Image (cartoon, rainbow, N blue to C red):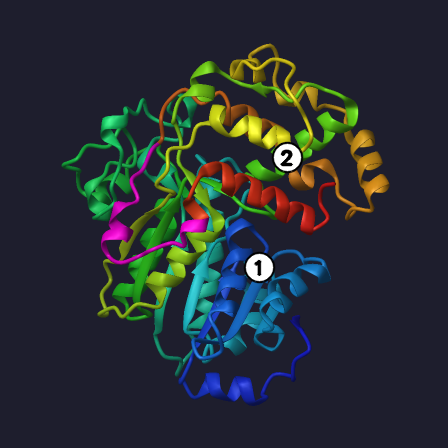
Amino acid sequence: MIRYINCRLMGGPVDSIAKQGREKVALVAGATGLVGKELVKSLLHSGSDNWTLVYGIARQQPPYDDYVDNANQVGSTCRYRFLQCDLLDKESTAKKLGDLARRVTHLFWVTWASEFPLDTPDCCSQNRAMLTNTLNALRIPGSPALPHICIQTGTKHYVSLKAPGLAGPYIEEEILESDDMSKFEPIVLPTKEGHDHDHEMDAPHMYNFYYDIERLVMERASQGFVNSWSVHRPGLLFGASSRSYFNVMGSLCVYASLCQHLGMPFHFYGTKFCWEEHYINMSDARMVAGQQIWWASSSHEPHSKGEAFNAVDAAPFIWKQVWPALASKFGIECKSKETNNWMSEETCYAEIMHGKQQAWDEIVSANGLRKTKIEDLANWGFLDSLFRFSGKLLAAPGKAERLGFMPPCTYTDTNTESVLYWVDRYREMRFIP
């Protein structure tokens, strides 16, 4: 089913323009996620001269407010259409996307199947199947090659998912730069010289669906299905959504709201290393979306190799520097002026947040918020893993900058400003008080 926003039915003037090939038409798979929402908003904000139509796909129908949020903010409701579709369903995908084969020019792939653990063959199979179903639906007899496909994976591309802390023992001197997809070892600690990429992706007993979907796009590019493609690898994503499994801002917003409501201490329950060190890159969802649109909108010669970009903020991210401002945003004060008093290794979030649904229901009811369950926004197991990470997973953003990508400074001035921005967004969306 396609949902329209104050728009003419399919076949109207806007669609006619798209069919004639004079404009770009985007298909965003994962449109309700952290980056997907920002992609839709940014593509619409680009103006009708750039993107004639924007289609968003997700497994679940988002609230109507989300359409208004994505479209009305930029006065572009006529150019946005949402399709509810389970991309794992081959027949349904073919039926729902088949009509778009001659319209869509750019595919933004920011979705993934999370039913199985990341490091399992089942996870790899499901994610490859999702993308295969989508590409097959968009490639019907007579349809032209797609000008560009963007796929989003992550900086875990460079490490073994079975290593301690989900990453290898990184040191800051070996911050990564993805100038060439073939220069880094995705299974063990990367070296600056690198090895053969295909050999690494086929390493025995090592599974990461990132490699599977990259290989699939390479295959389709070599077959002439797509003229150019790119892969974008964010670090720890910061954004606003109720449809994301690894949602650090949603988790922190729910946690802070419960602390304020129940009078609990707003502690960073993790290790001193994670509290004080720059051990993981921050990736603001606005910047990640902007990077993808920037490269997709650039002119590329047809080739099957593709380009890889680290989609990470340049500023070092340290929780110790961000936490006091985050607490203040929720009206929570620390009795001591010592910054380290915010940190505690006594317990974990999965333990202290257990059984708090009733308290959350009270917050939602008292403040007239959207009705949600805690798990819609928060993932305590993820937060515990994040704050007990045993290594450093750091990537360098220099390649995109050298090629001309200039994210708005408001996205990356400081990590603290970015974090507080997303708190405001959750409030505007009526998810938190």
Between 114 and 250, the one nearer to me in the picture? 250
Between 229 and 214, the one nearer to me in the picture? 229
Residue positioned 39% across, 36% down in the render:
281
Q: Which residues are magenta?
A: 394-410
Mark 1 nearby-residue class (10 Å; few <14, some 14–19, many ≥20): few
In this view, which residue lies farthest toward the front?
A: 337
Taking the image as shown, residue 369 lies to the left or right of residue 400, namely right
Give the foreground label among 1 and 2.
2
Q: Which residue is mark 2?
A: 329
**First of labels 1, 2 by sequence position:** 1
The residue type indicated by label 2 comes to: Lys
Name the quarter where the C terminus is drawn.
top right
Q: In x, y percent, where is residue 275?
A: 47, 20
The verdict on residue 397 being magenta is: yes
* 330 w.r.t. 88: above or below: above
Taking the image as shown, residue 284 lies to the left or right of residue 59, namely left
The answer to which quarter of the image holds residue 306 is bottom left
Q: In x, y percent, where is residue 114?
A: 54, 43
SS under mark 1: loop
In this view, which residue lies farthest toward the top?
A: 346
* 232 w.r.t. 326: above or below: below
Residue positioned 73% across, 48% down in the render:
430
The answer to which quarter of the image holds residue 56 is bottom right
* 256 w.r.t. 181: above or below: above
Q: In x, y percent, where is residue 134?
A: 48, 64
Mark 2 nearby-residue class (10 Å; few <14, some 14–19, many ≥20): some
Q: Which residue is mark 1?
A: 89
Q: Is residue 30 visible?
A: no
SS under mark 2: helix
Residue positioned 65% across, 36% down in the render:
253
Q: In x, y percent, where is residue 122?
A: 48, 41
Give the number of marks: 2
